[in-house]
Each structure stands twice: as C-alpha cells, then as structure tokens.
Image (spheres, grey):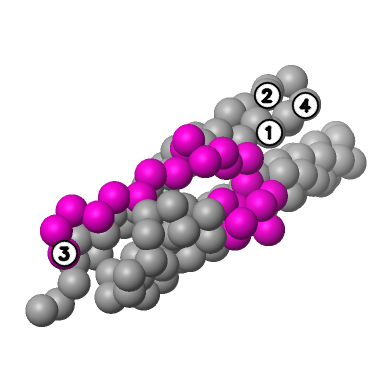
Amino acid sequence: MQRLKSLIGVLVVAAAFYVAWQLFPPYYNNFQFQDEIESQARLNSYTSKSEQEIKEGLIKKARELDLPLTSDQVKVQRIGTELAISADYSIHVDLPGYPLDLHFTPQTKNKKIQ
C-alpha cells in the first residue's frame, strides 16, 4: 500500500511538472511582450515615429517570441499627448485530455510629460 501511495505521489508531481512545462512558455512570452509594449510606449511618446512604424516593430518582436500576432491584432493610437498600445491574441495549448486556449491582452498607455 505504501508503494502505491508513493507511485501516485510521483505521478502527481510528474503531471504537475508537465503542465507547468507546457504553460510556462506562453505566459513568459506574454510577459516579455507586455514589457516590450510598455517600453515602446515610453520611448515613442517622445518621438515622431508613426503608428504604423511602432506597430511593425511590435509585430517583429512578437515573431521573435513566437506569438501568433497579426497586424490587425495590434492597435497603436496617438491621442493628443497620449500613446496607447494594445494587442489581443490567443495561444492553443494541447494538454492530454484537456486542450486549452490561453487568451492574452497586453496593453499600456503612456502620456507625454510636457
């Protein structure tokens, strides 16, 4: 009986590590992309880069991170002295017996200090 409990315990720990191994990369890549969005909003609030140029730079970064983003999913808007950037995408993760779609919406707003 003790061996059975030990075996079940090892299987539960192994399953937890497997799930973490599958879920960590999408969340980590989203964190990196969110950081890039915030960085670009801070930097480009004070430049004359067009919205399209900012969007293209973010799409390039998304490709580096293997994020399934298209140009339509990234929104860049300048409203007065404010720069707003947002994205909306989903990543499909196949867990055994439980397929999962993770939905991410990284976004930020930065207002230029005058």
Residue 53 relative to residue 100: left or right: left
Q: Give how far across and how far down residue 108 sits, in percent.
A: 31, 56
Q: Determine whether label 3 and label 2 are within 8 Å by CB.
A: no
**Of residues 88 and 51, which is closer to you in this image?**
51
Q: What residue did someone put label 2 on?
A: 99
The residue under the point 37% across, 59% down is 50
Query: As shown in the figure, which amino acid type bears the numbered disc 2?
Result: Pro
**What is the distance, in whole Å, between disc 1 and disc 4 at their CAs?**
10 Å
Q: Nearer the viewer, mark 3 or mark 2?
A: 3
Residue 92 relative to residue 52: left or right: right
For the N terminus, give its image quadrant. top right
**What is the distance, in whole Å, between disc 3 and disc 2 at their CAs?**
43 Å
Q: Nearer the viewer, mark 3 or mark 4?
A: 3
Q: What residue did someone put label 1 on?
A: 93
Q: Give how far across and how far down residue 67 sits, in percent.
A: 63, 46
The circle on residue 81 is 3
| Position of 61 relative to 70 (above/below) | below
Label 3 vs 4, first from the N-terminus: 3
User: Can see residue 89?
Assistant: yes
Element type at marker 1?
strand
User: Can see residue 109?
Assistant: no
| Label 3 Cα neighbours within 10 Å, binned few <14 / some 14-19 / many ≥20 | few
**What is the distance, in whole Å, between disc 3 and disc 4 at their CAs?**
48 Å
